[in-house]
Image: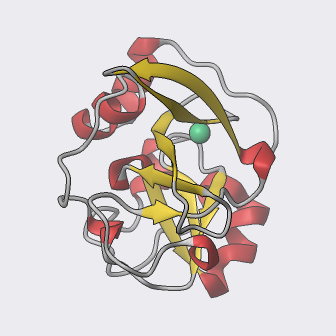
Amino acid sequence: MTGKIVRSDAEWRRRLTPEQYRITRLKETEPAHSGWYRTFDGPGAYCCVCCGEPVFHSRDKFRAPSPWPAFRSPAASRCVRERKELFHLVIRSEVLCSRCDAHLGYQVEDRSSPTGRRYLINSLALSFFEEQQEAVVLYQGRHGRPLAGCPEHPAGRLSSGVV
Ligand SMILES: [Zn+2]
């Protein structure tokens, strides 16, 4: 992880689409079964849509569809931080980007997972970069090119939307 990113609420609102802003900065959840990455199965890195930090990887993604894209673990433990909260009398962990504090989703216990955990992450909080571009993404960070053909992230979205 490179330096921490802190921006004003107005700045985030300006840089993100209204949907991305509501999910990542206001902690809303996209409707179940609506996210584009839920059934997506390509090899590569899933980056925070706010700052470009690689937060999850396809190798850790559950292949079976779930209401939200589901991962067994983050790309690296330092990529995300978790904050426990009480929700309807159940303790769950909010998952945030370590670099910019974007709300990504939630982590719940899952005995069927090898890690005992399941990370349910909003598609709108992620940008996918296919495998052969990952080195470019990690090297160039947020200036990497979005995956061609991804309907949620037409080419140029990241470079023009996040600096
Ligand atoms: Zn971030």
Q: Residue at x 43, y 13 (%)?
A: 9
Query: Residue 66 or 143: which is nearer the viewer?
Result: 66
| Residue 56 at x, y percent in the picture | 61, 60
- The color scheme shown is secondary structure
Q: Residue at x 68, y 75 (%)?
A: 134
| Residue 77 at x, y percent in the picture | 77, 49
Mark yes or no: residue 100 visible: no
| Residue 66 at x, y percent in the picture | 31, 66
| Residue 42 at x, y percent in the picture | 47, 85
Mark yes or no: residue 78 visible: yes
Q: Quadrant of residue 14?
A: top left
Q: Residue at x 72, y 46 (%)?
A: 79
In which quadrant will I find the C terminus?
A: top right
* Placement of 68 over or under 91, stated as above or below: below
- If the picture is divided into quarters, which one holds ligand 1? top right
In which quadrant will I find the N terminus?
A: top right
Q: Quadrant of residue 80?
A: top right
* Placement of 133 over or under 4, stated as above or below: below
Query: Residue 97 or 91: which is nearer the viewer?
Result: 91
